[in-house]
Image (cartoon, coloured by chain):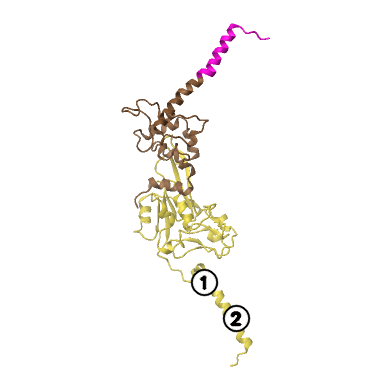
Chain colours: A brown, B yellow
Amino acid sequence: MCQITPCTTLLLSVLTLGLVGLAPNALAADELASRSCIKCHKRNGQLEGIHASPGLAILCQDCHGPKGSHPKKGSTIMTFGPDSPFSAQQRGAVCLTCHDHQALGEVEWTHNVHANRLGCDQCHRLHPEADPMLSLDTQQHSQLCIGCHQVEQ
Amino acid sequence: MQVSKRQFLKGVGALLAGVSVYGATRTPQANSLLQPEKESELKYAMVHDENACIGCNACVQACREVNHIPEDVTRVKIERKGPFGEYPDQSYRFSRVSCQHCEAAPCVRVCPTGAAYIDKETGIVAVNSDRCVGCQYCIAACPYQVRYIHPETRTADKCDFCQQSRLAQGLQPACVEACPTKALTFGNLKDPESDLVKLLKTRPSYRAKVDLGTRPKLFHIQTIDGEIML
């Protein structure tokens, strides 16, 4: 027979509180913040590609940083793409918090030679359903190189 | 003089046979054997500047398209070595692998049917696919391993500097035209004014496996940066 002492009751209640009460609340706070982004960014905020898979549970602020004063002046929010005020290295560093540069280099050697020259966002797209870089055939791959490396004939 | 019907038919038959044999042997190789030796003013060669090459494979794609090369074989390859250096400052080295158009071509020497030949006019090592029986002696003999059996024609095939597809129309080889960084230079070794000769005279270059005595005509300009590889 198991005996229920006041001590175990206290322990159980603390555990229950921790599992049922606290954890979802902590998650909800992040999620709520992410949802508030979508209120304005209905068109450009939807994450549909592989980064949207539920297992990853990626939120807006994971890549774009905390809201801060955004959209008012003095915002330090992280932006990507050609209009970003951040350097290629700064933008790339965000991706490299999860991605391993060595693994990337093994899959596609061109990652290595552009590591300190280009940001990931100059070729890759995260938000759309399909990243254009993942469906390149050999010819399109070559054309992509030529797009930047063409010297005057 | 009386000519019987039998004699007449025999004569016509012999004449037809003679004409057809003569026609069949009027191939480029047979021609070069019959004509007296005359030094041609043309000797085509190519330079691959490994400093300019970015390994984009545009040359491979262009060759495939122009010469109708199926997916599983290729006339030209860009071999990639690396990465060298520490991340994020890394580099690779590229080297072109294709027919070297040897002056003393082992493939030509071993070909039992005369299908592999050196074009006397241009110095191009070419294949007469009508004569090739696909015995693969040339594939075994080539020290550069650039020959293959074309899956459609079942005959030996390799780079011919686009002899039929582009040179005949006065154009540069497809790979040279496709290169975005102008890493490839094609021209006449005998013309001191050609870009090719000027380039070879101003930049140090090397050729692969010269110690075999093949006298190849594909020149490489070695990568300058980084360590010396042994």
Q: Which residues are magenta?
A: A1-22
**Residue B230 shows in the view:** no
Contact flag, marks 1 and 2 (Cβ < 8 Å) = no
Location of residue B218 (image quadrant)? bottom left
Q: Is residue A134 visible?
A: yes
Q: Which residue occupies the foreground of this view, B195 or B153?
A: B153
- The residue tagged with tag 1: helix, strand or loop? loop
Residue at image mark 1: B26
Query: Of circles 1 and 2, which is in front?
Result: 2
Question: In the current view of this chain or complex, which residue is farthest to the bottom?
Answer: B1
Between residue B22 and residue A109, name the one nearer to us. A109
Eyeballing the image, is A83 above or below A138? above
Q: Residue at x 46, y 26 (%)?
A: A31
Q: Residue at x 58, y 7 (%)?
A: A7
The Cα–Cα distance between marks 1 and 2, rounded to whole angstroms, is 20 Å
Would you name the residue on which mark 2 appears?
A: B13
Label 1 neighbour load within 10 Å: few <14, some 14-19, many 20+: few
